[in-house]
Image (cartoon, grey):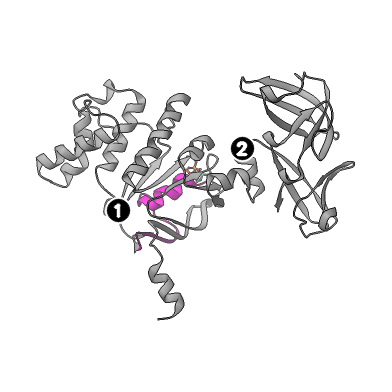
Amino acid sequence: MTVQESAARTRPVPAVEAEGIAKNYGSVTALKPTSFAIPAGSYFVLLGPSGGGKTTTLRMIAGLIRPTGGRVRINGADVTDLPADRRDTSMVFQGAALFPHMTVEQNVAYGLTLRRLPRDRIRSEALEMLKLVGLAGFERRRPHELSGGQQQRVQLARALVLKTSVILLDEPLAALDAQLRRDMCFELKHIQESVGITFVHVTHNQEEAMTVADEIALIADGELVERGTPEHMYETPERRFTAGFIGENTLLDGIIHGHGQEARLVIAEGLEIPLPNAPVGEGRPASVSIKSEDFRLAPEAVDAVSAPVEVVDVFYLGFSTVMHVRLPDGRPATVRSTTGALPTRFRSGDRAVLSWRPEAVRLHLA
Ligand SMILES: Nc1ncnc2c1ncn2[C@@H]1O[C@H](COP(=O)(O)OP(=O)(O)OP(=O)(O)O)[C@@H](O)[C@H]1O
């Protein structure tokens, strides 16, 4: 056995592997050839703007859409040619797609009755799942007697009871209000951790993605733009698009000038951003992003790099204050400060100085 063969044997098999999967609808490309692997037992989120290709990707894993090209493997087995009901996956849909005339227990048990299991076993497994999702005691109610959040939990129980190794969730929290959505995020994460199976969750909401995910894949314009842990996507995004979609970043485009310690991005006449880590690429177009909380606004410079600005508007949000400012050439920047840490209460029209540490600058090559 070669070293590579031995390594391949000991490498854990991913729960889901997409190898060059693609989908075209006539001349519309919903997903360009895309490859990724999802480790078993992880919580994986497909995040991105509307129309980017997330649902298409999820449905190809589920077997509800046939890829135009590429292969799908579940636990190492090629399932590309298998229908949805013969894959080791179950799906939770957007909104609560429950059977209205059935009780909660009947809804959860439905998939098991199709499998013709003994009635006692069906009952005990359905009740166990209702307990897991926090709905013990609700089994005799009908869907219309439940809140939106409770209906979503029933859907989750209905998927979990099938004991598949992968659960696919398509915008499961989209119909819920902001507070309930937040609470359900914590619960989903908690449930996934306690059952230890793989969750693949589609959302366009970055806060939801950051809360539940072990890993996020950002999908836009039919392409997987970048993937990584929530920390990576927020703190050290490689792509400009990622910095624009996740967090609250000021993006500035320019041309790299100079080398080593002298390297800087020239944005406009008189506006240059020193670049950390001395990139190569004199004359190359590039972008930088700076997180809103990495800027400091004060009457004078308070960090190593600074620029004079005009305050455009100020939003007091309690714990934090968000300020939109204009750089000397008119470009906008966003500053977020802990309200208590602000040296001055700025007002629209004030002149101030925006400062940041050189290390706060993230460089994005095209
Ligand atoms: N049946 C179809 N026929 C033609 N085009 C389609 C079809 N389904 C999806 N598309 C197109 O494919 C692209 C990707 O759609 P998809 O639903 O995967 O995006 P999404 O990222 O899930 O968006 P959303 O968050 O709005 O659901 C879109 O441009 C969409 O209009």
- Assess whether residue 68 is covered by the magenta stretch: yes
Residue name at image x 48 percent, y 36 percent:
208
Q: In which quarter of the image is residue 108?
A: top left
Residue name at image x 82 percent, y 37 percent:
306
Q: In which quarter of the image is residue 300?
A: top right
Relative image position of residue 361 (x, y in whole percent): 73, 45
Relative image position of residue 166 (x, y in whole percent): 34, 50
| Mark 2 neighbour class, 10 Å CA radius: few under 14, some 14 to 19, many 20 or more | some
Q: Quadrant of residue 128?
A: top left
Q: Where's the N terminus, which quadrant?
A: bottom left
Residue name at image x 73 percent, y 27 percent:
324
Judged left or right of residue 171, residue 284 is right
- Type of the residue with mark 2: Gly
Query: Visible in this render: residue 177?
Result: no
Judged left or right of residue 283, residue 130 is left
Depicted 192 relative to depicted 345: above or below: below
Circle on res. 247: 2
Judged left or right of residue 28, residue 355 is right
Judged left or right of residue 49, residue 338 is right
Residue closest to the eye, 326 or 23: 326
Q: Name the residue under label 1.
A: 88
| Mark 1 neighbour class, 10 Å CA radius: few under 14, some 14 to 19, many 20 or more | some
- Assess whether residue 92 is covered by the magenta stretch: no
- Type of the residue with mark 1: Asp
Residue closest to the eye, 293 or 185: 293
Mark 2 CB in 8 Å range of ligand 1? no
Q: What stretch is highlighted in magenta?
A: 53-76
Tell me the element at label 2. Answer: loop
Tell me the element at label 1. Answer: loop
